[in-house]
Image (cartoon, rainbow, N blue to C red):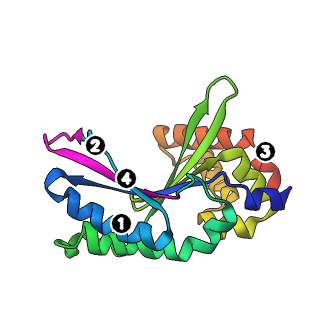
Amino acid sequence: MAEDLENEKFVKCYFTICSTASGLVSAKKDMKNYSDELDWEVTSDKEGYVSDNGARYYEIKVYPKKGFISPEELREKRSLLIGFTVSILRDVLYLYNPVKMPNKLSTAYRFNLIGKKKKQWNIEIIVDSIFVIECDLKKLIKLEQANKDLTREAFGIDLVDIYDQNLKERDSLFSGKEKKRKAGLIVNILQEGNIQNFH
């Protein structure tokens, strides 16, 4: 079972940046260098979207040719992918304004309800807003139960730690009402996958 999950292609990951029309050709060319190195695809949004300041932006995305990769493939490529994240920040997004480039990468996560009838959740792990990893939460919980090292090395997170941190936040006397609410939601989502039994 563990080996099946390690090699099952259920992980979606991609790089995503946005560009104005004037910079689109150049940005797409830059991103193609990364897609060629990874043997992935690069596409750009043809419609774009209008931001609050009235400018139109177009999304450029670099992603695996088959759409999904396995946790083991993610682990094998993680150093390269994180290196590319730094490189894209430095050489594409902050090339003309290096002072604003962050000193270190930040990682955030969120849970999305993707199956309302069966109440199926996925998790998004976002590295500095440009590198995204998505997968089915139940599968990731099972993978962490079977091979915690692989989960940490491939996904860069520890679901038990996330559960413990949010449980502490939810039950803290010093947490604000909104923080408690958000922490409680995360605790409930993870408890549906029996994460509390992995200690």
Q: Which quadrant would residue 24 be assigned to in this image? A: bottom left
What segment carries the magenta color? Answer: 49-64
Residue at left 58%, top 34%?
113
Does the residue at mark 3 contact the one at mark 2 (Cβ under 8 Å)? no
Position in image of residue 103 (x %, y %): 34, 75
Position in image of residue 52 (x %, y %): 18, 39
Kindly report which numbered mark, 3 or 4, lies closer to the viewer in this rendering: 4
192 lies above or below 127: above
The kind of secondary structure element at disc 4 is strand
Q: Nearer the viewer, residue 58 or 147?
A: 58
Could you tell which of marks 3 and 1 lies nearer the N-terminus?
1
Residue type for callout 4 = Thr
Q: Residues within 10 Å of mark 1 (few under 14, many from 20)?
A: many
Q: Which mark is residue 32?
A: 1
Residue type for callout 3 = Asn
**Alpha carbons under labels 4 and 1: distance apart:** 9 Å
